[in-house]
Every structure is written in structure tokens, then in C-alpha cells.
Amino acid sequence: MFVLQKSVPVKGVAALTADLGYAGQTAIDDSNGDRYAKVAGAWVKVADGAGNPVAPPLSGQITLKNSSGTVSRTLTATNGVATLAATDALVTNGSLIAVQNSAGADPHNATMSVTNGALTGAKLASTVALVDNGDTLTLQKSDGTTSAGNAGLNSPATATVASGVVTAVKAAS
């Protein structure tokens, strides 16, 4: 026999049918102390007779949220396993990701930064730089000094970027 909250007596696990009780209601098997809860329209075992939690295999729609609650996904769980869509990913702070140019070439690893459950950036190695069209660059001579007054090869030079590639560096006049 089971005893539901509000002292509704039922007999045996088979009596815990989907139409009995309401979401969140609990029942205790008086023969062994096992505890059941009504979750998503079905009764599931949540603890054994000693009070040890039992992870119920969830099935159906579940909502996952990041730690700050700003990003969520609704997934379908089957026997306790929910699979992300091919366009979603789990990322961890400090993991590496390959950053590519717009043509999908020249990949460089970047270290991901995750804050409050959201990907906030990816840092490139100190020896790799992003160059935008129109950025200025300092030209150096082979001895490392800045190039100035050098017949058209003066700093600062201007980068030309197209299709994700530096296509030219134009020296200042």
C-alpha cells in the first residue's frame, strides 16, 4: 500500500497511474519506504527506503539554462539523456577553438572565455593578431628601427584586407 500526501491510500506501485495525483506530489511505499514523485505526468522513484536519492531516467521535454539564466534550450530527453542539436555546443572556460578567416582558412587556436554561463570571447596567442582593413602598421627595417624617410617605404603603413586575407600593405608617403 502507498500513502500519498493528504493521506490518500493506494495499494502497490501499480496503483500509481498517470491519472492519479498531481505534479510534485509524493508517495511512500509503506512496505519498503521507497519514495515516488509525480513528474511530467508520471510517477518515478526518487529515493530508496533508506532515503538515498535515485536519479530517475527523465524522458520528454526539458529546459537547460546557463548559470545566469540568459541562455536556454529546450531539448527532448530519452531515458535520462538529452542530445544537443548539431548547431549547439557545450563549451568550458579555457577550452581551445580554431578561429578561421572568412574563407575558412588559416585557422589559429584561441582560448575560450566563459563567464556566467556564456561564451564571452576567445583569446588568440600573443604571436597571432587580427588585422582589419585600414589598420595601420609600423614598418621596420632589418635592424628593427622604424622605417621613415626611406623613399616611399615609410611608417605607418596601411593594411588592405579582402576575403579574410591581408592582400597588401601600403607604406605612408
Image: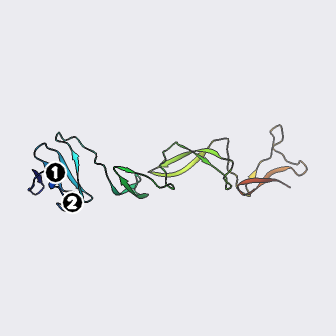
Separation of marks 2 and 1 at Cα, in angstroms: 12 Å
Return the mark for residue 13: 1
Residue at (67% x, 44% y) in the render: 128
Residue at (19% x, 50% y) in the render: 36
* Residue type, mark 2 in image: Ala
Q: Quadrant of the image for the C terminus?
A: bottom right
Give the SS element for disc 2. Answer: loop
Q: Quadrant of residue 18?
A: bottom left
Return the mark for residue 56: none
> Circle 2: is it few (<14), some (14-19), or many (20+) Cα within 10 Å?
few
Q: Position of residue 132 (x, y in %)?
A: 70, 55
Q: Position of residue 111 (x, y in %)?
A: 56, 44
Count every numbered label the image shows and give the total: 2
Give the SS element for disc 1. Answer: helix
Q: Which is more N-terminal, label 1 or label 2?
A: 1
Instruction: Residue lying at the far right in this picture: please name it.
Output: 151
* Residue type, mark 1 in image: Val
